[in-house]
Image (cartoon, rainbow, N blue to C red):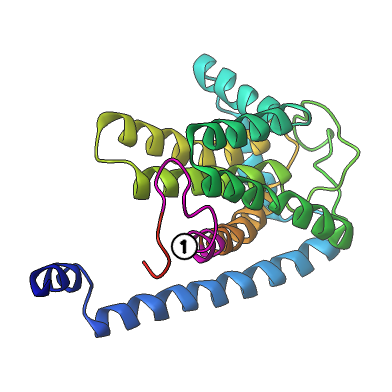
Amino acid sequence: MAGAVTKKTSAIAARPTRRARAAAFQAYVLGASVAFVALAVAAHYVPYFGLDLRITRAVQSLHVGVLDAVLRALTWAGFVPQVDVIGTLLFLTLFLFGLRWEAVGVLFAYGITFVGIVVKLLVVRPRPSADLVYVMSQLDSTAFPSGHVLAATSVCGYLAFLAYTLLKPSARRTALIGVALAIVPLMGVSRIYLGQHWFSDVMGAYLLASLWLALTIRFYRWGKPRFFRRQPVAPEAPGR
């Protein structure tokens, strides 16, 4: 019994290390929150920044066949109804596989889309104009923050977290994490490449979504020992 306790405690980082990590995380949350609010306020009054225009023109100068196809596919997947179908499939896959609380976490992660809608209504920033950059198609909704990037960052980040924490080290685990994390930056590039968002729209989405992802993981870890304790796969007893 003593050996088991020693084995468990040996896997825990020392108290100063834990405090330093907690402080670093709290500092990021505070910094990201302040940065997002400042950027949202600026976006409300400024249609686009000079840096936005330069970055968009630089990104749109890239014309690689495979990259073009990937970026267009990602943007297509982020529109309704495709994104809703993908979310439903993710939920059902996890739930039917036995990871029921993990499936609930997917729904929570998707909640960022509703937060994004509220922010869009408050900021009311116009999308890029076709007389400034190439625009694949003009959308009626406002630009800040990018809804595609919000969903991709929150959901793919959560899936990467699940793969990292639940799966044993393997090529499949590495591939799942790699694909999930690759989608996050590529989605942002795709929205700029197709002229439907400015760089600052994308960065605002990354800031907000990273905060929501942290909240999603907190929600998941809070509920894991409390709900679906007897789920078929990866159950967790209270207090663990």
Q: Position of residue 183 (x, y in %)?
A: 52, 36
Location of residue 135 in the rendering, given as x and y in whole percent from the top left corner: 78, 30
Q: Is residue 117 left or right of residue 156?
A: right
Q: Main secondary structure of the magenta part?
A: loop
Q: Nearer the viewer, residue 96 or 107?
A: 96
Is residue 135 located in the magenta-colored stretch of the structure?
no
For label 1, the SS is loop
- Residue placed furthest toward the left: 3
Q: Is residue 62 at all visible to an observer of this figure?
A: yes
Q: Nearer the viewer, residue 36 or 1?
A: 1
Quadrant assignment, res 152: top right
Q: Vertical placement of 149 versus 73: above or below?
A: below
Q: Residues within 10 Å of mark 1 (few under 14, many from 20)?
A: some
Q: Which residues are magenta?
A: 218-235
- Say which residue label 1 marks: 225
Task: Report the residue that reaches farthest toward the top.
Answer: 65
Magenta span has 228?
Answer: yes
**What residue is drawn where x is 64% and y is 60%?**
208
User: Hey, which residue is sitting farthest right in the picture?
Assistant: 140
Q: Residue at x 48, y 37 (%)?
A: 98
**Picture coordinates of residue 181 (x, y %)?**
45, 41
Type of amino acid under label 1: Pro
Instruction: Pick the quarter of the image with the C terminus.
Output: bottom left
The answer to whether any part of residue 46 appears in the image is no
Q: Quadrant of residue 30?
A: bottom right
Q: Quadrant of the N terminus?
A: bottom left
Q: Residue 19 at what x, y percent from top left? A: 34, 83
Q: Is residue 214 left or right of residue 5?
A: right
Name above or below for residue 221 compared with residue 160: below
Task: Report the front residue among 193 and 77.
Answer: 77
